[in-house]
Image (spheres, helix red, strand yellow):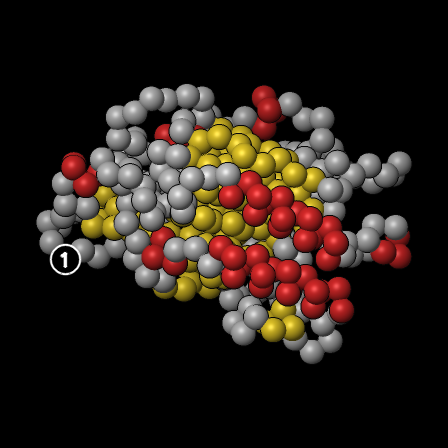
Amino acid sequence: MEHTNQQPTGPSSLRTDGESAPSDTSNCTKSNGTQRAATQESSSPTLLSQFSFFNVQGIAPQTQLSKVDFIKDHLEEGKKLFIGLSETWIYNHLDAELNIEGYTLYRADSKREKRKHGRFGGGTAMYIRDDIAASSQQILNFSNKVVEVVCTYSEKENLLLATLYRQPDDSSHGRASKNKEFEAALNSLSKAISTVDGTPDIIIGGDFNCPHMNWKSWTPNQGCPKDEKEMLQTLIDFNSQLLLTQIIMEPTHYQGNLLDIVLTNNTSLIHSHTVLPVPGSLSHHSMITLQTERVQSSEQTANRRFSSAISAGQLQFSQ
């Protein structure tokens, strides 16, 4: 079932063709998405943009077909700004194997040892569209064998993006995932964010694997394990420090759990979002796609900083 939620409208400073205002450029790569039409009050165009988060459950699995083409198609639909991927399961893969033209790949592979039998696990990555990646740098590549975080910052756009994956606790098989590892990851992310001058617009997403949390009240549900309660408090402290809001309230896993979340310090960035299941052969998790829009009246407006926006303006609708 598709879930659609509306959020406040936010501003944009990038052009509708995916080109940013004139600036120095560098290497980049691109992403895709689905888009809905927007209404408009005047002759000024409305700019709509999308970005996504998705637990891909192996972007290039050893025993299955590569999912790179699926991600490519998703990104190219509407020229999405970026996609944050969790559970990438990549290890010795070359960037060339994962390349999507027009998007730059940033990755944080898991450092955990691969079992003798079975797949490699964990990992996060982001494909960021070239016009944004041109001014972006990776400021965090973190893995403690339990949690992975990849984080980038664009000074030009004043935009900080991060994707996080936390493996579920599997202590009975020697793969514990406790608050100690979760807190270490968030501390590293907080430290990376603190290196940025001023207050950037922050968007953090990924599979946090906390199924027993009530995200509306930020309280543990009945039966929540002690370790998960500790992680909830750690996340509350992290969010309070950065003034973050959690956007997703619908189940994101086929079993009905809300595992994949999106955090931002500027809710006006998000106009609406959808949570769409994908074929089970691709992933047990739904694709989360978020949309933002802004009415832009002049080229001068387009040349302003991204300031508090993640809308890279991909389609232009005129009356």
Q: Position of residue 219 (x, y in %)?
A: 60, 73
What residue lies at 82% left-to-right and 36% top-to-bottom? 113
Nearest to the observer: residue 288 or residue 167? 167
Q: Position of residue 161 (x, y in %)?
A: 48, 43
Q: Quadrant of residue 123?
A: top right
Nearest to the observer: residue 199 or residue 227? 199
Image position of 167 with respect to 255: above or below: above
Which residue does the numbered mark 1 point to in the structure image? 41
Q: Can you name the residue that lies furthest to the left here?
A: 43
Q: Residues within 10 Å of mark 1 (few under 14, many from 20)?
A: few
Image position of 4 with respect to 126: above or below: below
Nearest to the observer: residue 243 or residue 144? 243
Q: Quadrant of residue 270?
A: bottom left
What residue lies at 83% left-to-right and 50% top-to-bottom? 175
Q: Is residue 200 left or right of residue 64?
A: left
Q: Is residue 309 left or right of residue 52?
A: left
Image position of 45 with respect to 274: above or below: above
Nearest to the observer: residue 294 or residue 279? 294
Q: Position of residue 118 (x, y in %)?
A: 83, 40
User: Looking at the picture, which amino acid does disc 1 mark?
Assistant: Glu
Q: Position of residue 85 (x, y in %)?
A: 57, 43
Count of marks overlaid on the render: 1
Look at the image and tell me whether residue 123 can be seen.
no
What residue lies at 58% left-to-right and 50% top-to-bottom? 206
What residue lies at 14% left-to-right and 45% top-to-bottom? 297
Q: Is residue 29 left or right of residue 226?
A: left
Q: Can you name the residue that lies furthest to the bottom here?
A: 222
Helix or strand or loop: what does disc 1 sit on? Answer: loop
